[in-house]
């Protein structure tokens, strides 16, 4: 099958969050299944090029409502694969360093930037003389891709392609002025509630949901949650309308990158058969975060954006109570809301030696937290899929998570009666419920034999992209059948 992936971020080139991890890993897994895959991304100013990048001399013409525009295409092989990744150079929109927002806030022309990118990515099919069977769009920046396939490209060879729209986070919906329609040369009749209009504006994501052949999101539980009034953020009614075409597919992780036997950030490699070697990573973690190494104390780690969605305020509220214990330490790595940054920085000084904070992001330190901590905290208010808990389990670091979205789908509750499970879950988004889950984890910490068994069981879970790629292959097949008028009812 020929698959075109259109993405606003691709790891390792341009990354804000988990979307980039998905678009950097999924194409490689699809290629391994024998698919012909191409991926397209904007060439942002933050992307560094070397001799492996090949500029294409043939210009890319992009029709818009204000006339033809001309972009340049760069090609580079996606690391770890044999497939080409294409990057669209257009300085007016993409030369700036930031992807979505800078120090001053959200880029005011994001609608034009990503609308233009979506149209340019589709025009590349003619530029390459390569017509996909499937066009796979990701989140609101590419929400107009399915709309374009059903309107300005209808009746062309490209218009035969089926579309899949993946929602990574329903909270971000791409609201913008209706002038985006004329800017992109789209038909004005699209500005209706049953197409792209929402609350008097254009919602790029809503357009994608209405027009995509199939819709996916990044976990089965999240696919159910977003159909409700709380999880849907105003899109719940349209998602219920498209429920027959809405499928939850869990993200995977790149096991060549997230593997304690291969990770250069760890002082000593380890696996489920050699778990005592994990202790060396704990020692290194203490050095990096200024903790006093104490094998009798459990380290609870956080690698996260410090935002309300991630529930880190729940942790802030209970840190003083937990630090009164003599069996616990914390490390926090992340950046985000100033209030939370200040609080965790203050804990670093107030509980010196037992609480380590690093404001910012450091990839090596992140790997060290996953490898060296004993438990990993994700008290998210909502979490479409979550990757941190998957990375943690791959390193034998037991997750303590809220039972929402992909966290509920991937972490199995520890049962103290028979010792089964892979982590700890709590239901209510409250500090009290979170505290109780941490206390249950500390009870397990006392039983070293069971602790070893839970760690080993977590490490043996298969969260590779292999099963996820097979699931996406099924979605693509269903989408092609539906585009060709074949009745298909996927059950997953």
Image: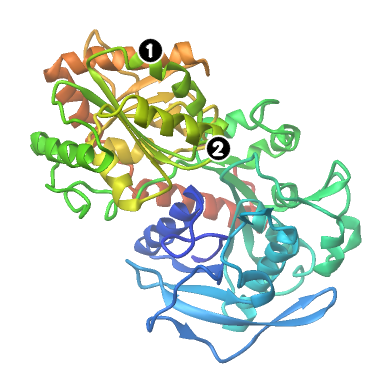
Q: Is residue 376 above or below residue 140?
A: above
Going by the image, does 358 lie left or right of 87? left
Q: CA distance from mark 1 to mark 2?
A: 23 Å
**Crowd band around label 2 with a 10 angstrom C-alpha radius: few (<14), some (14–19), many (20+):** few
Please, which residue is most extreme toward the front here?
349
Q: Counting residues from the N terminus, which is met first, the one under dot 1 or under dot 2?
A: 1
- Point out residue 19 in the picture as x, y percentages from the top left corner: 51, 51
Foreground pick, 30 / 192:
192
Which of the labelled discs sits on residue 321, or is there none? 1
- Count neighbours of disc 1 (C-alpha within 10 A) and say few if under 14, some if 14 to 19, many if 20 or more: few
- Where residue 338 is drawn, which disc sits there? 2
Question: Dividing the picture into quarters, in which one does residue 241 lie?
Answer: top right
At 63% from the left and 32% from the top, the residue drawn is 226
Q: Residue at x 66, y 44 (%)?
A: 172
Q: Is residue 284 above or below residue 22?
A: above
Relative to residue 372, is residue 45 drawn left or right? right
| Horizontal relation, residue 148 to residue 183: left or right | left
* Residue 232 or residue 329, whichever sits in front: 329
Residue 489 in percent (x, y) is at 59, 41
């Amino acid at each position: 099958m020929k698959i075109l992936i259109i993405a606003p971020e691709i790891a390792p080139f341009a990354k804000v969050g988990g979307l980039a991890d998905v678009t950097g890993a999924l194409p490689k897994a699809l290629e391994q299944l024998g698919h012909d895959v191409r991926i397209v991304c904007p060439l942002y100013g933050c992307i560094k090029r070397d001799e492996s990048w090949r500029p294409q001399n043939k210009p890319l013409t992009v029709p818009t409502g204000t006339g033809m525009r001309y972009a340049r295409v760069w090609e580079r092989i996606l690391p770890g694969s044999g497939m080409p990744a294409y990057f669209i150079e257009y300085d007016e929109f993409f030369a700036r360093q930031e992807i979505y927002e800078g120090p001053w806030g959200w880029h005011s022309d994001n609608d034009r930037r990503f609308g233009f990118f979506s149209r340019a990515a589709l025009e590349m099919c003619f530029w390459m003389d390569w017509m996909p069977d499937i066009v796979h769009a990701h989140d609101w920046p590419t929400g107009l891709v399915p709309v374009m396939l059903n309107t300005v490209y209808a009746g062309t060879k490209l218009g035969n392609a089926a579309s899949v729209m993946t929602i990574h986070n329903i909270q971000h919906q791409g609201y913008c002025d209706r002038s985006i329609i004329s800017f992109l040369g789209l038909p004005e009749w699209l500005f209706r509630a049953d197409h792209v209009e929402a609350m008097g504006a254009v919602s790029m994501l809503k357009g994608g949901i209405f027009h995509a052949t199939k819709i996916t999101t990044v976990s089965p539980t999240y696919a159910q949650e977003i159909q409700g009034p709380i999880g849907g953020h105003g899109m719940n009614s349209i998602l219920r309308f498209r429920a027959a075409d809405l499928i939850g597919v869990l993200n995977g992780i790149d096991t060549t990158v997230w593997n304690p036997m291969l990770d250069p950030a760890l002082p000593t490699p380890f696996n489920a058969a050699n778990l005592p070697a994990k202790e060396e990573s704990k020692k290194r973690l203490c050095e990096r975060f200024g903790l006093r190494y104490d094998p009798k104390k459990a380290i609870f780690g956080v690698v996260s954006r410090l935002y309300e969605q991630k529930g880190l305020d729940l942790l802030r509220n209970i840190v003083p109570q937990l630090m009164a214990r003599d069996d616990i330490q914390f490390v926090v790595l992340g950046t985000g809301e100033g209030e939370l940054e200040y609080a965790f920085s203050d804990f670093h000084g107030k509980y010196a030696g037992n609480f380590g904070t690093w404001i910012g992001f450091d990839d090596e330190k992140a790997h060290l937290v996953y490898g060296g901590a004993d438990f990993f905290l994700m008290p998210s208010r909502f979490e479409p899929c979550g990757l941190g808990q998957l990375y943690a389990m791959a390193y034998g670091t037991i997750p303590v998570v809220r039972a929402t979205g992909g966290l509920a789908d991937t972490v199995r509750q520890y049962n103290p009666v028979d010792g089964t499970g892979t982590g700890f879950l709590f239901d209510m988004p409250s500090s009290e419920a979170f505290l109780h889950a941490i206390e249950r984890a500390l009870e397990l910490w006392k039983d070293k034999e069971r602790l070893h068994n839970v760690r080993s069981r977590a490490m043996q879970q298969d969260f590779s992209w292999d099963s996820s790629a097979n699931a996406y292959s099924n979605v693509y097949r269903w989408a092609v059948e539906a585009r060709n008028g074949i009745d298909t009812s996927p059950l997953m």
